[in-house]
Amino acid sequence: AQSVTQPDIHITVSEGASLELRCNYSYGATPYLFWYVQSPGQGLQLLLKYFSGDTLVQGIKGFEAEFKRSQSSFNLRKPSVHWSDAAEYFCAVGGRGFQKLVFGTGTRLLVSP
Amino acid sequence: GAGVSQTPSNKVTEKGKYVELRCDPISGHTALYWYRQSLGQGPEFLIYFQGTGAADDSGLPNDRFFAVRPEGSVSTLKIQRTERGDSAVYLCASSLTGTQNIQYFGAGTRLSVL
């Protein structure tokens, strides 16, 4: 069965510090992996995606993620967090073609001054 | 429009009533998806359309839920005999091509069943 695990419900990071949000997935075929961000009252905005090729992918707002097949992981990173990054972050997995996405339960990021 | 549009943004109804939620996808996007996001959870898939037909409705929780997309653009999610457990944010997404499966989401409709 397809599933995504985001083990951290909440994370607090100081402004300017680095960030890593964890994501582990279970998928029976070649996965397409995504990170979305959701601000309060807003929809989901795509940060970045991995389909194939280079396992380190760059996204918007200075985020990057690394696909590690051996660990079934797709962790999100940012070298220096800004207060505006405070939001909820969702990792998702899907397949090639028009298919549903399976989401994790999300990680809420709090940024302290 | 520039993005996926969902109306209304908020809907309050009473238990047992019927509701309709509307989604207007990005122009030209052939696939349209509905998800439901309960408090503290990630979005959960309900149904997806390719053109006018429902290609996968495996996520609909029961027969009180139904969705249509009669002209291959706007879609309506219909919930009959609403229950308090139906309270959630209903998200709509659309995508252009199948190969990359990039889904663009609307802001959602927050449904509250009293």
Image: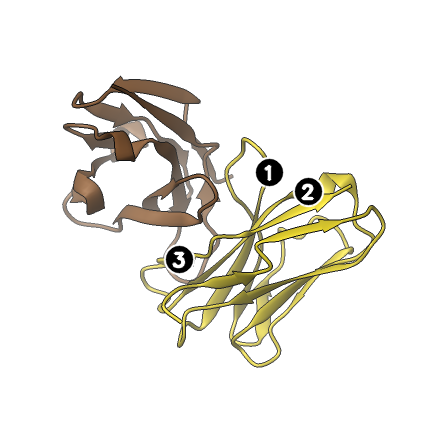
Residue A17 spot, x, y in % from top left: 18, 20
Q: Are marks 3 and 1 on the same chain?
A: yes
Q: Which residue is mark 1?
A: B38
* In the rendered image, the vertical position of residue B16 relative to residue B23, given as above or below: above
Which quarter of the picture shows residue B112?
A: top right
Q: Residue at x 54, y 31 (%)?
A: B40
In the image, A3 versus B41, the foreground residue is B41
Q: Residue at x 27, y 19 (%)?
A: A13
- Whether the residues at callouts 2 and 1 have beta carbons within 8 Å, the answer is yes
Whether residue A10 can be seen here? yes
Q: Earlier in the sequence, mark 2 or mark 1?
A: 1
Which chain comes out yellow in the rendered image?
B
Q: Are marks 2 and 3 on the same chain?
A: yes
Which quarter of the picture shows residue B96?
A: bottom left
A3 displayed left or right of A113: right
Q: Which mark is residue B87?
A: 2
Q: Which mark is residue B85?
A: none
B33 displayed left or right of A89: right
